[in-house]
Image: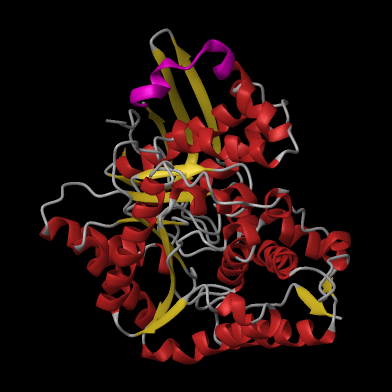
Amino acid sequence: MPQSQLPYQHTHHESGAYHTIDAIISPQEQLNILSKAEVAKLLDVSQSGLYKLFRSCALAVLNCGNSLDDGKELLERYPDFAIQIIQEERGIKLEVKGAPASAFVDGQMIRGIAEHLFAVLRDVVFASSDERLLRSLDNDRTEATTDAVFHMLRNADVIRPKVDPNVVVCWGGHSISMGEYDYTKKVGYQMGLRGLDICTGCGPGAMKGPMKGATIGHAKQRLGVGRYIGITEPGIIAAEAPNPIVNELTIMPDIEKRLEAFVRAGHGIVVFPGGAGTAEEILYLLGILLHPDNRELPFPLVFTGPGSAADYFRQIDAFIGTTLGPEAQQKYQIIIDDPEKVAKAMVGGIASVRAFRKQTDDAYYFNWQLKIPRDFQRPFAPTHENMRNLQLNREQPNHQLAANLRRAFSGIVAGNVKDEGIRAIEANGLFEISGEQSIMQPVDDLLTAFQNQGRMKLPGSHYTPCYRIV
């Protein structure tokens, strides 16, 4: 068990500061056998900004449970936070200084948070030192990117052979109402009763609720410890720090590989109410499912929420119909205020997935047959120039339009919560998004609704738009 070896050392009491603790943490399992080269790579703070990346991800994990969805503010809140690897002949330890005190109980780091901390170390080390993975990441072929996603998931032990399909990916906002949050728990409970495991973006809100509900369902069925998989990426982890229920955490290199990991590892997807990030996820999946090569592939997709969210999903459905057309609307079903029906729909849909993969001799644990075009894999840098140059018109196939709409919402997420996005807005002003009127009007209407419903930032936070529709 990871343990903190040093007691509570000092607390800041002055106004505007936060309680912090210094400690040394011991790992378990595979991280006890890192090579000296891997350790040296992390110790070299000048190499490719690796230390900066590791520090920001580690701080986000240690900030678990605190209401904050601003990557820039988190780094500024704990300016003295430092993390260092201590190499020993029999393994390594981590020394943290100025860590958020909420990660500790009686001077001991909470075990789940310690596990998350070492998951960050594992994925940062692996992504920066595995030569096969690096070759895949540098390769511009679709198959190479998928290979990289597979290796990241396998290294994190997310891929489990000889297990029937049962992983439901749950998408939805980190900023949702209490009624919507309670509903996500009810859906998770019904899925847990039916032996389904949960995978989410690992943060609060609609990412935490299904896991929390499923733990009760799994316990009632005496299923032992369920799987609560969290998949994140460095840019978003500060805004959506892993919630304490996550027991399998993996940090993908970027948002595109995170999204591919969801659809490759999951066997069905449930979408709860959310904001720009949820719209990005919906557009990503619909764009893939609209590709001609995927039309016969079973992929259960359900949009659901309590009765109070009926108007929200009517608007989402109308937006999809207006921008991507009726074919896209046929890829999902909307179920309002019926958790049991949602769970049964997932069980039935996943049964079809299992039969299809058995018939086609495909793996249960990784969706190899899903065709993901290169435009959905290529990392999109949300710069002002790239946002301004997005092609948002109907002079392209629907799946390509979905890819570009996904990029627009991805940029808005970056401007809302990611450290680099917030700083870019501060330096250069608002992102400008332009396109065909018949597309931009629905986009503007949807984003305005998200603002009015408080879905862009956590409750109590003031939201200032990071974009302007031109």
Q: Residue at x 59, y 67 (%)?
A: 286
For residue 29: magenta? yes
Query: At 45% from the left edge and 61% from the top edge, which residue is drawn?
Result: 298
| Residue 205 visible in the current orientation | no
Question: Can you say whether 428 is above or below 322 in the image?
Answer: above
Magenta-span inclusion, residue 314: no
Q: Quadrant of the N terminus?
A: top left
What x and y, as percent, mark residue 303?
Answer: 45, 76
* Coloring applied to the structure: secondary structure
Q: Nearer the viewer, residue 233 or 329?
A: 329
Answer yes or no: is residue 71 visible. yes
**In the picture provided, is 125 more to the left or to the right than 470?**
left
What residue range appears in magenta?
27-39
Judged left or right of residue 304, residue 136 is right
Q: Residue at x 62, y 56 (%)?
A: 293
The quarter of the displayed image where residue 423 is located: bottom right
> Residue 417 in the image: x percent, y percent?
63, 63
Residue 54, given in percent of the width and then of the height, sits at 58, 36
Q: Residue at x 56, y 27 (%)?
A: 125
Q: Main secondary structure of the magenta part?
A: helix
Which image quadrant for residue 207? bottom left
Q: Nearer the viewer, residue 371 or 200?
A: 371
Is 111 situated above or below 51? below
For the residue pair 97 and 245, the one nearer the viewer reads as 245
Can you say whether 374 is above or below 352 in the image?
above
